[in-house]
Image: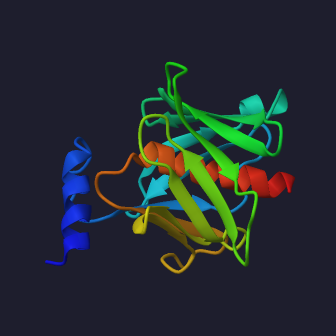
Amino acid sequence: MPRRAERREERREDRGPGGGHTGPTRYQMRQKLVSIGDDSWIENDRGEKVYKVDGKALRVRDTLIIKDRQDREVAKIQTKVVRVKDSMEIEGPGGERLGIVKKALITPVRERYTVKIGDGPDIDIQGNILDHEYRFEVGRDRVAEVSKKWFRVRDTYGVEIDPGQNDVVILAATVALDMMQGRG
């Protein structure tokens, strides 16, 4: 096994809980998922509702709540205005910061964003964000991918997350990107 593949496997093992899957997890999301006052569902690849995106808080400010099937908050996504550019903050149910999605200042050909993770490695996001064809990478390793090609349903795209990743953070970052594109 090449050295790079060995390091990737070691990192996956180190990530702990959630890494028990044998392959990536796929979720199905709708384009224009976010509507003021509306709730939407994120489904797994078997069509089961997994997370609810609660749009009620959008009426007051740019805030979305992601809840699990038991209606427990798992993440909150909020707009943050920083000195140079807008960003979206992802918080956990206890208000702890899980990450901040920021647009890269310099974008050569493709759009580029970064998810700043508090005590973990940052996740780079690049590709065609508007067309839902992009990748999440830590260093040079893909950790998740967003694509329309996995589902034939109109206005639907998939999010494939590698084992050992925090699915909620990746899904919340995907929703945040949709919100940021909508404001564009």
Residue 84 horizontal side relative to residue 171, left or right? right
Give whichever of 176, 141 is nearer the camera.
141
Q: Residue 37 placed where, x, y %?
A: 77, 37
Q: Residue 144's quadrant in the figure?
A: bottom left
Residue at x 57% of width, y 69% of height: 157
Residue 3 horizontal side relative to residue 181, left or right? left
Residue at x 42% of width, y 35% of height: 119
Residue farthest toward the left in the current orientation of the protein: 1
Give whichever of 155, 77 is nearer the camera.
77
Residue at x 21% of width, y 47% of height: 14
Give whichever of 143, 59 is nearer the camera.
143
Q: Residue 156's quadrant in the figure?
A: bottom right
Is residue 22 visible to the viewer in this orientation of the structure?
no
Q: Residue 41 placed where, x, y %?
A: 56, 48
Q: Residue 135 placed where, x, y %?
A: 52, 68
Residue at x 53% of width, y 81% of height: 149
Q: Is residue 118 above or below residue 14?
A: above
